[in-house]
């Protein structure tokens, strides 16, 4: 018999009333009954009963913005250059040791790639240079990509391989960094300048993709995530996903966000029209308007708090000009697509909201759910405007814990940094929002993310933004039912209600009872489509420290 009843603990349905029933009954892939135990038993006579033993049952987590399976690309295929608290690279010497080890394992002429580098956490506080990477190897193209995914450093062989020379001009929305004498340093900023080296499928073939897919799936399921996202899916990556989808249920559900530049041709293609498999679905189209705070390329209306070394304070970098953004938004809006747009700085958000307003004036559409991704420094007036335009936001509160101290001291200063990822203002304005980790920028750890959103404590212990705190219940909703809503899947998943998929997570404790210690709660079990797909060992997972 495949019918089961869960009872004997706290059940947080996260439905419209946030009801807390006594029991949940499932049969096959679906939830069939929710309510009093006697009623659920009557609905599923003779079903197996699973005693929660005081634990808490919630709907499975939904990733509202990430880059599945990038985390496994880093672990399995690249030199992992992450620093504490994620890794153990503390200096450039550690970085070069990792790259040297990777080069020693790689045939001459093939690429050596390092990933997840954050120079702000290194003893030297800087990125490596072209000359230093030449010292690692002159027999391999060496490419080191920053943890933000928005910049990197290449050695001479990699620059030559990509056709980048001393006379190569900067592309729109990107930069090839040079020293005082005008010589290329190897540093490359912006996706337009990085070219294929900025894409997640760089150096990935079908075999390595499938191995990474399977490893990432196990990581996500272990942390209670059953619906993941790849939010920058170029055409080659779409083809890799399609090959997996054609094999049947891959063990996790995915939403892919095709990049806007391949439209309208992609929507007319056989690949799109005959997309294989229901578990991996095509979702919103994706745009980028600016860069990363860590590289000071997020586009602001006011300059950064301090200047980058050797530079005057500036307001960052726009990846698209106003006319190009208006044209892309209008195109996608008129095609009927939902649009998710990366806007880190408030100047970027202003331009995107202007483009949405213009598109709606020409072609009114109800319930479009166009979305701002990150919205790191959105102002109160912008969130009020979102409410008026029907725009939703997916915030990146993990920045508070990982880089909040840097925002406070360098990037935004003591005042502006209080309001990064302004979930409090969004709630006040009536804007439905979600929260994300943007894996692999930060790891997929829903409970750590919810804890940070609720408590807003930085890595040094500073509380950043008392006004932006929200309740544990609101944060849970932002990673479950509201995340389902944001991609038009609220009728299928995101809450514990009859008819929805039986995607469930069993937690060792109730987050509502211990909001100051959510990061210490263990995911005991993950259930997907009515089957248990993860069960924790007896050891405690604990906080990400």
Image (cartoon, rainbow, N blue to C red):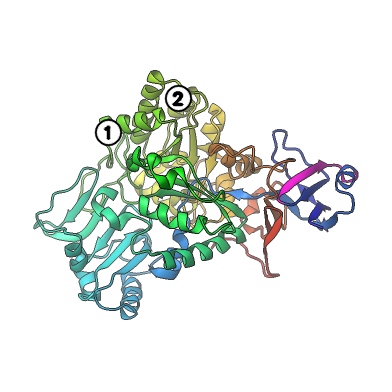
Residue at coordinates 11% horizontally, 56% vertically from top-left?
180
Q: Nearer the viewer, residue 499 or 455?
A: 499
The residue at which mark 2 appears reads as 385
- Give yes or no for residue 90 being in the magenta stretch: no
Q: Extreme top residue here?
A: 361
Residue at disc 1, secondary structure: helix
Residue at coordinates 52% horizontally, 54% vertically from top-left?
461
Q: Nearer the viewer, residue 494 or 250?
A: 250
- Give yes or no for residue 37 being in the magenta stretch: yes
Residue 233 image point, x, y percent: 40, 49
Question: Which secondary structure dominates the residues rendered in magenta?
Answer: strand
Residue at disc 2, secondary structure: helix
Any mark on residue 324, and which?
A: 1
Residue 519 image point, x, y percent: 61, 56
Residue 473 vertical position relative to residue 206 in the rendered view, above or below: above
Using a 10 Å C-alpha cutoff, classify the residue at mark 1 as few (fewer than 14 neighbours), some (14 to 19) or many (20 or more): few
Q: Which residues are magenta?
A: 29-38
Q: CA distance from mark 2 to mark 1?
A: 22 Å
Q: Is residue 525 visible?
A: no
Compare marks 2 and 1 and give the one earlier in the sequence. 1
């Amino acid at each position: 018999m495949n019918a089961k009843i869960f009872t004997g603990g706290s059940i947080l349905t996260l439905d419209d009333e946030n009801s807390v029933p006594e029991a949940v009954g499932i049969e096959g892939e679906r939830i069939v009954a929710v309510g009093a135990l006697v009623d659920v038993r009557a609905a599923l006579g003779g079903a197996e009963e699973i005693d929660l033993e005081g634990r808490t049952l919630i709907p499975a987590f939904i990733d509202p913005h990430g880059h599945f399976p990038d985390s496994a690309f880093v672990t399995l295929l690249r030199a992992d250059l992450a620093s504490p608290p994620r890794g153990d690279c503390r200096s450039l010497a550690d970085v070069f040791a990792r790259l040297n080890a990777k080069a020693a394992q790689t045939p001459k002429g093939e690429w050596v790639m390092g990933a997840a580098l954050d120079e702000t956490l290194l003893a030297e506080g800087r990125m490596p240079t072209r000359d230093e990477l030449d010292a690692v190897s002159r027999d391999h193209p060496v490419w080191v990509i920053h943890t933000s995914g928005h910049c990197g450093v290449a050695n001479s062989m990699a620059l030559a391989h990509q056709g980048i020379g001393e006379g190569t001009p900067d592309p729109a929305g990107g930069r090839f960094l040079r020293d005082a004498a005008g010589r290329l340093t190897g540093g490359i900023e912006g996706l337009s300048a990085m070219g294929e080296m900025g894409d997640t499928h760089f150096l990935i073939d079908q075999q390595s993709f499938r191995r990474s897919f399977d490893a990432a799936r196990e990581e996500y399921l272990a942390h209670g995530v059953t619906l993941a996202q790849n939010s920058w899916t170029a055409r080659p990556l779409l083809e890799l996903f399609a090959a997996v989808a054609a094999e049947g249920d891959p063990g996790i559900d995915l939403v892919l966000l095709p990049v806007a530049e391949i439209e309208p041709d992609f929507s007319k293609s056989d690949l799109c029209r005959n997309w294989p498999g229901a578990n991996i679905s095509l979702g919103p189209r994706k745009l980028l308007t600016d860069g990363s705070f860590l590289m000071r390329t997020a586009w602001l209306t006011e300059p950064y708090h301090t200047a980058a070394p050797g530079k005057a304070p500036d307001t960052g970098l726009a990846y698209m000009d106003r006319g190009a953004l208006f044209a892309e938004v209008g195109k996608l809006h008129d095609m009927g697509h939902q649009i998710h747009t990366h806007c880190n700085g408030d100047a970027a958000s202003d331009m995107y909201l202007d483009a949405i307003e213009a598109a709606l004036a020409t072609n009114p559409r109800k319930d479009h759910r166009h979305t701002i991704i990150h919205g790191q420094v959105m102002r109160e007036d912008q969130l009020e405007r979102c409410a008026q335009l029907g725009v939703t936001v997916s915030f990146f509160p993990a920045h508070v814990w990982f880089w909040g101290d840097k925002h406070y001291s360098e990037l935004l200063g003591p005042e502006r940094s209080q309001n990064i990822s302004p979930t409090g203002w969004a709630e006040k304005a009536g804007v439905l929002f979600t929260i994300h980790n943007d894996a692999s920028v930060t790891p997929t750890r829903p409970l750590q993310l919810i804890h940070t959103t609720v408590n807003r404590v930085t890595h040094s212990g500073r509380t950043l933004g008392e006004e932006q705190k929200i309740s544990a219940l609101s944060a849970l909703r932002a990673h479950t039912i509201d995340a389902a809503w944001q991609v038009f899947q609220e009728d299928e998943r995101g809450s514990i209600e009859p008819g929805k998929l039986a995607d469930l997570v069993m937690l060792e404790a109730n987050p509502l009872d211990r909001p100051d210690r959510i990061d210490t709660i263990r995911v005991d079990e993950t259930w997907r489509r009515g089957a248990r797909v993860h069960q924790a060992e007896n050891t405690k997972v604990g906080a990400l420290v």
